[in-house]
Image (cartoon, helix red, strand yellow):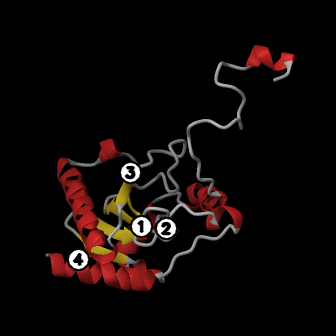
């Protein structure tokens, strides 16, 4: 470290110095993130509001509930990456009703059961990104992510080749999950 860096550096060293964290850089997602916020200005331009107006196959919907629905992510981190969305166009978790909250939780649990049956993941990432600063690709409409994970799924391909290996088409994944969902009901 140069002497001039001492005044602006803490005890943890400079950025880029190896530490105990592993990082998965996903620059290919920036095109989606950058375009996402400007694309959704209101309910008329919201893909989560438009989806339920289409057929399940066209919209990639795997299940329709009373207050929420489950849809495949058009830009999946992994095969089977699902989103649970309320039908209402609301941006924040604190905006949904008690009934919507309960159904969102129940559909998240059922999504995990169905994904275990269909693709046997080793684990899951669950989460909601609230607001543009919180990382939401579409901040205007609340949605919860259910991302199935397998040991070793964070390989070099997206980083080196700027390519994500998805072994099935979204239509094939939707059909398998939808069929398994119906069997589980």
Q: Secondary structure at mark 3?
A: strand
Picture layout, residue 20 above or below residue 152: above
Label 1, residues with CA under 10 Å away: few <14, some 14-19, many ≥20 = many
Give the CA distance from mark 2 to mark 4.
Answer: 19 Å
Answer with mark 1 or mark 2, whichever residue precedes in sequence. 2
Taking the spot 57% from the left edge, 59% from the top edge, the residue there is 36
Give the CA distance from mark 4 to mark 1.
Answer: 15 Å
Give the CA distance from mark 3 to mark 2.
Answer: 14 Å
Q: Position of residue 99 (x, y in %)?
A: 17, 53
Name the quarter where the C terminus is drawn: bottom left
Residue indicated by mark 1: 81
- On screen, residue 30 versus residue 168, left or right, reads right
Taking the spot 85% from the left edge, 21% from the top edge, the residue there is 2
Q: Position of residue 142 (x, y in %)?
A: 38, 53
Label 2, residues with CA under 10 Å away: few <14, some 14-19, many ≥20 = some
Name the quarter where the N terminus is drawn: top right
Label 3, residues with CA under 10 Å away: few <14, some 14-19, many ≥20 = few
Answer with mark 3 or mark 4, whichever residue precedes in sequence. 3
Residue indicated by mark 3: 127
Taking the spot 46% from the left edge, 53% from the top edge, the residue there is 140
- The image quadrant of residue 179 is bottom left
Q: Residue furthest top?
A: 7
Q: Secondary structure at mark 1?
A: loop
Residue indicated by mark 4: 181
């Amino acid at each position: 470290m140069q002497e001039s860096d001492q005044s602006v550096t803490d005890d943890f060293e400079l950025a880029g110095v190896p530490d105990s964290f592993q990082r998965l850089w996903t620059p290919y997602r920036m095109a989606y993130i950058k375009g996402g916020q400007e694309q959704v200005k209101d309910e008329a331009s919201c893909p989560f509001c438009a989806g339920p107006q289409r057929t399940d196959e066209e919209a990639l919907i795997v299940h329709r509930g009373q207050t929420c629905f489950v849809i495949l992510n058009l830009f999946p981190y992994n095969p089977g990456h699902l989103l649970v969305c309320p039908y209402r166009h609301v941006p924040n978790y604190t905006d949904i009703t008690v009934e919507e909250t309960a159904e969102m939780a129940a559909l998240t649990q059922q999504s995990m059961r169905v994904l275990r049956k269909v693709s046997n993941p080793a684990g899951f990432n669950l989460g909601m990104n609230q607001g543009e600063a919180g990382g939401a690709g579409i901040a205007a409409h609340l949605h919860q992510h259910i991302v199935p994970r397998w040991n070793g799924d964070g390989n070099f391909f997206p980083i080196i080749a700027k390519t994500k290996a998805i072994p099935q088409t979204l239509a094939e994944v939707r059909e398998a999950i939808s069929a398994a969902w119906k069997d589980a009901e």
